[in-house]
Image: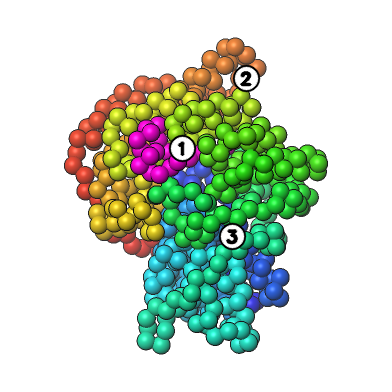
Amino acid sequence: MDILFGQSYFLRFDPKLYDAMQPYPPLGTLYAAAIMRERGYQVALFDAMLSEGTHEWDAALDRHAPRYAVIYEDNFNYLSKMSLLRMREAALAMIKMAQARGCVVIVCGSDASDHPTVYLQAGADYVILGEGDATLPELIDHLHNHDAPNVHDIPGIAYLDALGSVARTLPRPVISDLDALPFPAWDLVDRDRYQHVWRERHGYYSMNLVTTRGCPFHCNWCAKPIWGQRYHVRSPEDVVAEMQWLKDNFAPDHIWFMDDIMGIQDRWIEQFADQLDEAGLRIPFKSLNRVDLLLRGRAIPALARAGAQIVWVGAESGSQKILDAMDKGTTVKQIYEATRQLHAHGVKVAFFLQFGYPGETREDIELTLKMVRDLLPDDIGISVSYPLPGTKFYDNVKHELGARANWVDSADLAMLYQGPFRTEFYRQLHTVVHKEYRARKTAAALRSLVRDPRHLRPALIRQSAAMIYHTLTLPAARAELDRLAALPHAPTEVVIGGLMD
């Protein structure tokens, strides 16, 4: 085998998401594999998503005996951008395993782009900086055939020079013609295993797809180490062609569009819906959108017509003061109106909520809780402000960071800088928000059941029991939150080790 592709996001190492068990193959890795195969190389995939640990990468190296071991992170997975410590440790262990077998080791991903020295000193031969789809083939052509430019003339890489110092080549422009890329190498994925997991746990099978790369907006906490401030989009025709191919070959019941923002222009969404109508194709999907863009033109009716089942929006906060401090560019009023319109068109809406931004007070937090009570979104995701290199937020708080600057896993919720409150407060806040939210959602469902008993489901009976529990325990949970709010705050100082044992 010429190239063994892998990535270090192990679902097994992220307890919260492992419990949710909604796995998706590493789409960015599959694009890179398709590109290299199109170039004539033999490729194989080690899919960490459903792997039990790095020992399976070790076995894959023995089985395939590749010349090149490419740890190519799925840059469409937001958790890769967060650079979780468990995943970094996994990547470093994988590098050493490949190095021990004499492989040329190449790494591409957000964390490696931000911290190439960490990966090079661990044994990687090359780190691809930013987007790798054009850099990887040029680099491997050079290594394989020695007829490409000298390595220092290949844009977008870092490596150790003869003196052991990190050398960086010139940046490489990102790819603008996304329609020219091949479809991801889905045949490398264990389709049957993914289908079994999804259907057993959720009763349907979901697959992932992207229509865009990048984001042009300026939220000052959002890192963009791969595509920077640039944004490029596939044609609606190309996206619909891929959806038809997926339907014909994999028959998914659902699609997750992993774009940072799907459809900046409402005209694109309308053309997308038109193309789906013309093809007679309808696969329910979830997508990520901005509330201000949803309110332009006919974006929401077009999303509903295209098959949008649920739209996640970066609501972040119910306080306009905090949204403005984040340079979010949206308003609380827009969150309310977009939610109303989505529900009016039969589309569910979910909120990403972010607590702990500098300057946030208990009053700001209560405004966010009020927004959730008022709108009762169909789902919520809660995070704490997370300083990532390359952002204005990071630059403002980097002098306050403690012994570690990353979470261990996605449920960590550690306050890493001298924020408004300490880590224990935000973990308790997570509990309080979910208790109140789940209780109110179930109560609303029960009111709907009184109006129409046909809505009765076994799950609702179980949820009703949970509602009683959450309602009874909410006052004590809020009292504990008040107690934690009074404690002094210092950054979490935790040194981890042995995670790969």
Q: Quadrant of residue 35?
A: bottom right
Residue 368: % across, % down? 38, 31
Q: Amino acid at mark 2?
A: His
Viewport quadrant of the N terminus: bottom right
Residue 431: % across, % down? 37, 34
Determine whether 301 is above or below 388 in the image: above
Residue 65 appears in the figure: no
Mark 3: give few (<14), some (14-19) or many (20+) Cα within 10 Å: many
Residue 20: % across, % down? 51, 43
In what element is the residue under mark 3?
helix
Q: Which residue is mark 3?
A: 28
Residue 95: % across, % down? 47, 72
Determine whether 283 is above or below 473 in the image: below
Q: Amino acid at mark 3?
A: Gly
Q: Which residues are magenta?
A: 311-330
Mark 1: give few (<14), some (14-19) or many (20+) Cα within 10 Å: some
> Which residue is drawn at the image coordinates 62% and 20% (left, top)?
455
Left/right placement of residue 362 relative to residue 334 reads: left
Q: Amino acid at mark 1?
A: Thr
Q: Which residue is mark 1?
A: 330
In what element is the residue under mark 1?
loop
Q: Nearer the viewer, residue 56 or 357?
A: 357
Determine whether 147 is above or below 64 in the image: below
Residue furthest top in the image: 451
Q: CA distance from mark 3 to mark 2?
A: 40 Å
Q: CA distance from mark 1 to mark 3?
A: 29 Å
